[in-house]
Amino acid sequence: MTVLAAPPGLARVLDQLQHVRRMGDSWRGKCPGPCDDHHAALSIREGSGGRVLLYCFKGCQLWEIVCALGLKVSDLFTRSKRPRRVPAPPLRAETEYELARAMVLREEESLLRMRNRWTPLWALSDAVREHSKLVQRYRQLAASCGGEKEGTWFCLAEAAHHQTLAHLAAHEADQLLTEVRRGHERQAQAS
């Protein structure tokens, strides 16, 4: 795809992208980076001095995008022969506020994914801790009852029950942690 209205450095980038469309004084296209973009998440714009500015709204790093295009970062800094111009205000206002808000929302989404992944493990570790405390309390009660009293056997039976529950929760937590580690390993191998 040849983009006629773009300076040479910008045209070289735009020619290598798919689904490129103009939006005011910038372009949007499908990001070639590792974000698995199905929409036009890559913003392309000419900066001052003929620089090519790239920003992926899905979070790809500049070097990932440039490598996927088969370019070097220095290729984005070609000087344009035309005089520096003052850009017209964009049709859709992509202000610093909107860019910062998008970044904060991505970070919040990342933290939420992390919290959702670890919450079951935290709950299981709390269960192990609480059942272990109950085991100690029932054993203390049994010791304080002493002898062959009915309360002693009840306390010991409850201590055994809670000890079993603590072991089951610990085993389930170990399985969950192993599953999370395998997921991290698969994710590291994929990237």
Image (spheres, helix red, strand yellow):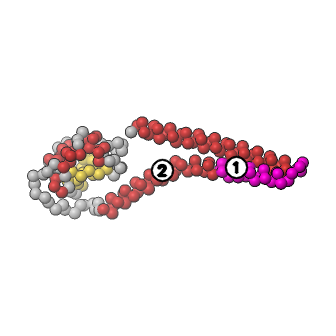
User: What secondary structure is marked by label 2?
Assistant: helix
| Quadrant in the rendering for residue 83 | bottom left
x, y percent for residue 105? 40, 57
Q: Is residue 72 left or right of residue 158?
A: left
- Judging depth in this view, the residue of 186 and 129 nearest the camera is 129
Q: Is the magenta stretch mostly helix, strand or loop?
A: helix
Residue designated by label 2? 113
Q: Residues within 10 Å of mark 2 (few under 14, many from 20)?
A: few
Q: Which x, y percent locates residue 141?
A: 80, 54
Give the magenta part as a residue range. 127-150
Q: Nearer the viewer, residue 129 or 100?
A: 129
Amino acid beneath label 2: Arg
In the foreground, 109 or 2: 109
Quadrant (top left, top right, bottom left, bottom right) of the N terminus: top left
Left or right of residue 80: residue 90: right
Task: Report the residue marked by disc 1.
Answer: 132
The image shows a total of numbered marks equal to 2
Rendering coords of residue 43 (x, y %): 27, 52
Horizontally, residue 11 falls left or right of residue 175, namely left
Please state which of the two labelled residues, at mark 1 or mark 2, is closer to the viewer: 1
Q: Residue at x 33, y 63 (%)?
A: 97
